[in-house]
Amino acid sequence: MADDDRRHGAGDYEPGDTSMRVGMESLRERGLDPEELRERLIDAIGAEFSTYYYYTNLRMHLAGHEDYKEITEDARLEDRAHFELVAPRVYELGGSLPNDIGTFMERASCPHAELPVPMGGDAPDNIEQLDAESVLEVLLEAERCAIRTWSEICDMTHGKDPRTYDMASRILQEEIEHEAWFVELLSMERDGEINPAGHFVRGEPGDAPYSTNRRINDSA
Ligand SMILES: [Fe+2]
Ligand SMILES: [Fe+2]
C-alpha cells in the first residue's frame, strides 16, 4: 500500500531509524523536555534507592519496638519497589543509571536517612542516646522529601506524559501513606498524642498496593 496515508502511519523520520524515539518526541511536542525529565527521574530513584538502604539500618535500631520495625519494613520495601518501578522508564527516555553508585547517591534528590546518632565502626558508643523518637523523626522527614520529589514529577508530567505520571502518582500515594504512618507513631512516641494515620498494616510486608511493578508489568 504505497499511498497509505493513515493518520498515524508515519512520522518525521526515516522508517527504522533507531537514533530517536517517538516516545520521547511525543513528550517534546507537548512541551515536556524528555531529557530533563529523565535526569529528574534518576535523582528521584537515587533517593528511593538510598532510602531503601538507610531504612534497613534505621529498622535494625528500633529494637524493642516490633510495631515500629514492621511499619519501617513496609516503607523500606516499598521504596525498593519505587526504584524498580521507575528504573526502566529512565532507559525508555534514552538514559541510563549512573555506572558508579557513588555518583548515583551523590545526586539523589533527598538527604540520606542516616541514623540520628553515629553508630558502629569508630563512632563512640552512643547507644543510650539512640531512642525511637529520634529514629521516627528521620523516617518522617525522609517521607516528606519523597512527597515533594514525586509531587514535582507529577506536576512536570501531568497532561503531557501519561506513563510517567501514572508511575509517579502511584508512588506519591504510597509516600503520603508513609508520612501518615510516621506522623501517628511520632505523635504518640514523642508527645503522647493520638494522631491517627487512618490505616492498618499491609497484608504482606512491603505490599506496595499501588506501585509494585509486578502487578503492572510482569517483565520488569
Ligand atoms: Fe518511596
Ligand atoms: Fe516512603
Image: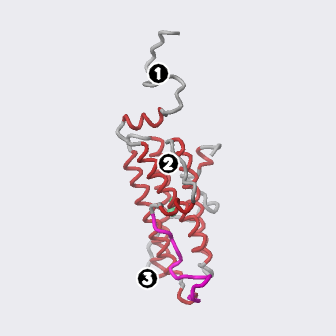
- Residue position marked by numbered label 2 in the rendering: 167
Residue 51 in magenta?
Answer: no
Q: Residue at x 57, y 64 (%)?
A: 52
**Closest to the observer, 4 or 91:** 91
Q: Secondary structure at mark 2?
A: helix
State how far apart marks 3 and 1 are (Cα).
63 Å
Disc 3 is placed on an element classified as: helix
Query: Disc 3 marks which amino acid?
Result: Asp
Q: Nearer the viewer, residue 71 or 45?
A: 45
Image marks 3 and 1: residues in contact by CB distance under 8 Å = no
**Mainly helix, strand or loop, the magenta region?**
loop
In depth, the one of 205 and 12 nearer the eye is: 12
Please state which of the two labelled residues, at mark 1 or mark 2, is closer to the viewer.
Answer: 1
- Please check the rendered image and state whether residue 117 is part of the magenta-colored stretch, yes or no: yes
Which tag, 2 or 3, sits closer to the chain's start? 2
Mark identifier at residue 24? none
- Which residue is disc 3 drawn over? 191
Residue 23, percent from left and from top: 48, 35
Q: Residues within 10 Å of mark 2 (few under 14, many from 20)?
A: many
In this image, 67 relative to 29: left or right? right
